[in-house]
Image (cartoon, grey):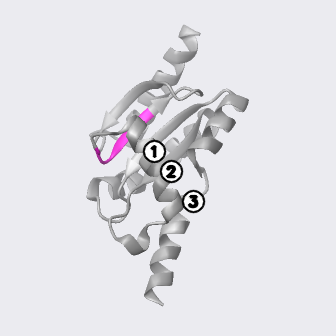
Amino acid sequence: MRKMISLFVCISFFSAPGWHNKQEAKQIAQKENKHILLNFSGSVWCGPCIRMHKEIFENDVFKNMADTQSVLVNADFPRVKKNQLPTQQEINNKIADQYNPQGKFPYTLLLDANGKVLKEWEGFPNEPPQEFTIEIRNGIYADRKSE
């Protein structure tokens, strides 16, 4: 029974509303002229990652911005083998090879719709969710201005 509960928690985290896989996010971003916010996390073992999801990503100001201006991708790396979904883990490993070869956690990237890195944040942002959200908006605005 414990295996099923642990696996369910992991699946629920990946399929939380507003979060997409990278391929889906790229399609949505290109179709809707949005940017991609890619977050690398260890959802069950990384304290700063857990804080980031609770304090920033679940904040209403952040969620409102994310819904209108970006598409969210979470590359999660659970350490316990029973919590790893093999296909999803392969996908996350490929994303990490491309965007996070040093294995930083949490690590957040703002990408354009084609996957080009525009801005990055290493670790837990030492600022309120509203200020972090403004930084993301400013990155999006600067990219749109340069088009």
Residue 77: percent from left, percent from top: 38, 57
Q: For residue 120: magenta?
A: no
Q: Is residue 87 above or below residue 69?
A: below
Q: Which residue is mark 2?
A: 91
> In this view of the protein, which residue sits in the foreground, 3 or 130?
3
Upstream in the sequence, badge 1 or badge 3?
A: 3
Q: Which residue is mark 1?
A: 94
Element under disc 1: helix
Q: Which residue is mark 3?
A: 16
Q: Is residue 16 above or below residue 121?
A: below
**What segment is highlighted magenta in the picture?**
103-109
Of the residues tagged 3 and 2, which is closer to the observer? 2
Query: How far apart are labels 1 and 3 at the CA level?
Result: 21 Å
What residue type is disc 2 on? Ile
Element under disc 2: helix
55 relative position to 33: left or right: left
> In this view of the protein, which residue sits in the foreground, 73 or 79?
79
Query: How far apart are labels 3 and 2 at the CA level?
Result: 17 Å
From where the camera sits, is residue 96 visible?
Answer: yes
Residue 32: percent from left, percent from top: 71, 31
What residue type is disc 1 on? Lys
Element under disc 3: loop
The quarter of the picture where residue 34 lies is top right
